[in-house]
Structures are given as structure tokens and as C-alpha cells.
Amino acid sequence: MMINLISDTVTKPCENMLKAMINAKVGDDVFKEDPTVNKLEEMIAQMFGMESALFFPSGTMANQTAIKIHTNPGDQLICDKYAHVYNYEGGGVSFNSGVSCKLIDGERGMFTNKQVLESINPPDFYHSPKTSLVCVENTTNKGGGACWDLEELKKIKKTCNDNNLSFHLDGARIWNALVRTNKKPKDFGSIFNSISVCLSKGLGCPSGSMLIGSKEFINKAIRIRKILGGGMRQVGYLAACGIYALENNIKRLNTDHLKAKEIEYVLSCISIVKKVEKVETNIVIFETEANVSSELFLNMLNKNGVKLISMGDNKLRLVTHLDYSDEMHKSFLKILNDLKF
């Protein structure tokens, strides 16, 4: 039995999701004639209380499209040093938009309104880049699945309004944050100018992300998506998976969170584990002692049929997910308890 905890992107569609895919009514989405895509876009927009939404093949493309719309070449966006848009999108911020990043040294991928205020370049000082956008990630990937405080986000929103800045949410794992904090999608839709949400992580879809915003914003996004090569045809087969996931796979995320907490406890009891980041949702990040390399730890787990991922500096990451069964969980906890170094 292989236990794959590399990411929550490794899941495969369940039988009912496959049935929804097979039975989907489709059309040419480039001409906006795919009824299932249209239904999903309307569904997502209504959930977040925003005007419009657009289907994308990936969260990276959705984020990059938002950044392109909110900025001009030579501008600067503010984000945390752990942000996905900075670390894991192939330098797309500079390649696609000609924009630089001002990195905030936050806490577990999150920063404060005070730090945002300190990071805004004076608009009349032409020697420095013009600050035009603030990006946050919820939950934070490199921060170990941490959830932002809604009140702090509201403070940052006011700062953005006061300084004529746009505010974008990389909500790749927003579903986990919603379940963990017992908040509603509209709580976030009322704060941000644009939001990207992923369907292929915790919700178990094979592919797909959504970008949400005003009608004017999404009309611009359609053009940028085309430029980036993201226009697809009978994509209703994937959209059907998204509809099924939204209707069936959100509440169950709490199961993933509980399993991650149990793993956190077991790891904290292992002598060669130096530190385990606080677990809030489905991501567990831990660090091994200096005398035990992360490569050695990974190899030992691989021999026991468990796959994790290294983050460098003796840090490792695992992510619980839809396909990580109770049987796998029980087996993995035993493997951890029985490790000998």
C-alpha cells in the first residue's frame, strides 16, 4: 500500500465524480457556450458574493492573470516571503507582468496591516517602483496551512483603499480555511478585488481553478487567459467535477485536518524531529535534527511505502487529503512510531 502525502493534488476522481464528468453537457467554452462551465462560474461567483468568475486550467494561471490586470510593467506588489506567487509560479510575476515583489518577513506566511503600511513605496518618489497590489495566500502553503485572521484582512483592505492599491487573494486552499475558521465565502468576497480558488487540491478534482471578481475584471481576465494559452474547448467535463466537489467535498475537509493534527502529535514525539509547525488545516511541516538529514528521513519512509516532499534546510512537508484513507492513516502512524535511527 503506497501512502502518497506529497500534496493534496495527488487525488483521483471518485466514481461519482467520474459519473458527473461522463454525464456533463458540454460546448465550446472559448465561445462561452459550455453550459456546465457557465453553471460552475455562476455558482462560484454567487458563493463569494462577487459578480463574475472564470474557469482556468491552473491556480498559477489564475493568479498570474490577476496580477497582470492589477498592475503595469515596472510596478511592485507586496506579498509575504513565503507567498506562492513569489516562490512557486516560475517567476511569472516578472515574466508575465514586468512586476517586482516587495517581500514582507511575516509569521508563517502572514503579515500585519502595519507591515503593509511600512512596505508601500511613496507614490511621488519616482526612483522606487510604484506599489499597486497586495497579495495574500490563504491558507499559507510554506506557512504550514495557517489561516489568516479575517479582521486583519479587513484592516489591510482599508489600507489598500486609502492608498489606491488592489487586493488579491490566492485562495488555493481557501476551502480548508473556511472549514477551519467557520467563515463563509462571502466574508472574503466582500474584502478582495479578486480571488483565485483551486478545485484540484482539497476538493479532489483532476484539474481546474477559478478566478473571481467584478464583471469588468473578468472581461479583462478572458483576454489575458487567451494570451496565456488558457482557453479550452469542451472543458465542461472538468467543470462537472468542480460542481460535484463543491456540493460534496467541502465539509469533509475537517477529516483531513484531524488526521494532520494526529500526525503532528506523533511527529512531535520522535526524538530526531527538531520542530513541528503548528497544524491548523491539512499541511504538516516539520524539521529534522541537524544530525539526521531530511534525505535520510525521506528514504526511510520511502522504504516503508510513504512519500513526502522536501522543502530544503532539513524541512519536510506532508499533506493529508481525500484519498488518504483511515487505513493508510493508521498504518502511517505506526510507521512513524516504529522508525529507528
Image (cartoon, rainbow, N blue to C red):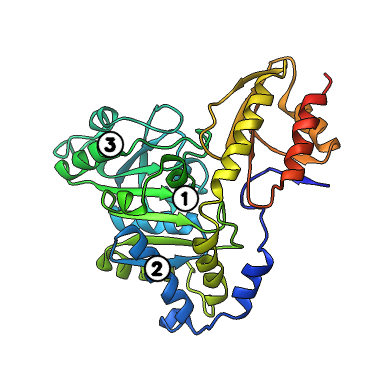
Left or right of 120, for residue 148: right
Q: Is residue 22 positioned above or below 178 on the image?
A: below
Seen at 28% across and 36% down, the residue is 151
1 or 3: tag closer to the N-terminus: 3
* Secondary structure state at the residue bearing disc 3: helix
Q: Which residue is mark 1?
A: 175
Seen at 52% across and 71% down, the residue is 239
In the picture, the disc for residue 43 is 2
Q: What crowding class fits label 3: few (fewer than 14 Cα within 10 Å), some (14-19), or many (20 or more)?
A: few
Three-letter residue code for mark 3: Glu
* Secondary structure state at the residue bearing disc 1: helix
Q: Which residue is mark 3?
A: 151
**Badges 1 and 2: C-beta atoms under 8 Å apart?**
no
Q: Foreground: 327 or 100?
A: 327
* Secondary structure state at the residue bearing disc 2: helix
x and y percentages locating residue 219 in the rendered image: 31, 70
- Label 2 and label 3: CA atoms lie apart by 26 Å
2 or 3: tag closer to the N-terminus: 2
Three-letter residue code for mark 2: Met
Q: Is residue 313 positioned above or below 31 on the image?
A: above
x and y percentages locating residue 3 in the rendered image: 76, 44
x and y percentages locating residue 53 in the rendered image: 37, 66
Q: What crowding class fits label 2: few (fewer than 14 Cα within 10 Å), some (14-19), or many (20 or more)?
A: some
Seen at 44% across and 70% down, the residue is 40
- Label 1 and label 2: CA atoms lie apart by 15 Å
1 or 2: tag closer to the N-terminus: 2
Is residue 312 in view?
Answer: no
- Label 1 and label 3: CA atoms lie apart by 18 Å
Asked where in the image residue 223 lies, by quadrant, the reply is bottom left
Left or right of 312, for residue 32: left
Is residue 65 in view?
Answer: yes
Q: Foreground: 117 or 241?
A: 241
